[in-house]
Image: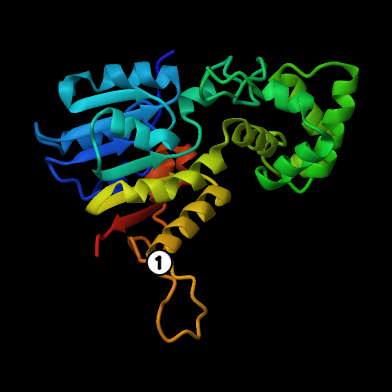
Amino acid sequence: MEFNHKSVLPEETIDNMNIKPGGIYVDGTLGGGGHSYRILKKLSGKGRLIGIDQDSDAICAATERLKEFGDMVTIVRDNYHNISNVLNSLGINSVDGILLDLGVSSFQLDTIGRGFSYKEDCPLDMRMDDRNEITAEDIVNDYEEMELYRIIKEYGEDKFAKNIAKHIVAARKKQRITSTGQLSDIIKSAIPMKVRASGGHPAKKTFQAIRIELNRELDVLEDSIDTMIDLLNDRGRLCIITFHSLEDRIVKNGFRKNENPCICPPDFPVCVCGKKAKGKVITRKPIVPSEEELEDNKRAKSSKLRVFERIIY
């Protein structure tokens, strides 16, 4: 199956990266290489792009898509959480821009067998990196009921989280839950009929929650923002595209903290904490897709782009 994934907010993202022809850029979520292709088109022979992804399918697809750029591209199979180590191993101390396009690619969702989608019956996997020993099946069958409730409530933001967790635990006592179809049916049975009739797919939020937990998506994001900003050269930019409110909140708060890190009480006449700003937030409000893009790509619907510019004062 071809790695088919439409890049979200493509023009807006590339415009906001302020690309210098001879600069060094990192795409921390390489995917099929859509954003990277656009970055490389703006680089001269002196420019360089480092693409990072933990998904082996993405690595293969992007390697093929970007091969025309030759030595300008270096592709590394890793998690962007390890961006410092990746750059160190390449002898790079700082870069001119970093991009993250978070969430699941269309390819991952649509590939039967990856277990990301509730629309097809297949093994409960959901690993973005198949070297991970734990799968979604382990979470569904081994987590305590209160832990399941917590992740479905926090990461899925589902008001029926308590009932869904209860139904999962009751079902797995009878037999181990091993497929997306089984799990989807269990979730449906935990949600009132009238809600099922009016809302989206009843399993969507729980599947999202399990995927986030398994791949540590929010922890990785929260732990990485400061590091990525520190790696930027003066006037370098960090562009992050998120797809749900929890990710967006982490990015918004992380950017705000780096713009105004002072922790002194508001009534102090001067700052004594010594925490200095690392730059400025470019996007006071997030950039969202145009009507034209939404018509062309329904999966762009919830996407938001936020941009931070490093300023070395």
Q: In the image, 249: left or right of 190?
A: left
Number of marks present in the image shown: 1
Q: In the image, 172: left or right of 261?
A: right
Residue 309 in the image: x percent, y percent?
Answer: 29, 57
Q: In the image, 107: left or right of 124?
A: left
Q: In the image, 45: left or right of 49?
A: left
As helix, strand or loop, the secondary structure at mark 1 comes to: loop
Q: How is the image coloured?
A: rainbow
Q: Which of the image's four quarters has the N terminus?
A: top left
- Image quarter for residue 277? bottom left
> Tag 1: residue type?
Lys
- Image quarter for residue 278? bottom left
Q: Crowding near pointer 1: few (<14 within 10 Å), some, many (20+)?
A: few
| Residue at horizontal 67 percent and vertical 43 percent from the top | 156
Q: Which residue is mark 1?
A: 275
| Residue at horizontal 41 percent and vertical 26 percent from the top | 78
Q: Relative to the observer, which residue lies in front, 288 or 309?
A: 309
| Residue at horizontal 83 percent and vertical 36 percent from the top | 145
Q: Which of the image's four quarters has the C terminus?
A: bottom left
| Residue at horizontal 27 percent and vertical 21 percent from the top | 65
The answer to whether 77 is drawn above or below residue 252 in the figure is: above
Residue 280 in the image: x percent, y percent?
Answer: 33, 63
Residue 1 seen in the figure: yes
Residue 28 seen in the figure: no
Q: Relative to the observer, which residue lies in front, 259 or 174?
A: 259
Determine the residue located farthest toward the left in the rendered image. Answer: 45
Residue 26 in the image: x percent, y percent?
Answer: 29, 37
Residue 118 in the image: x percent, y percent?
Answer: 65, 26
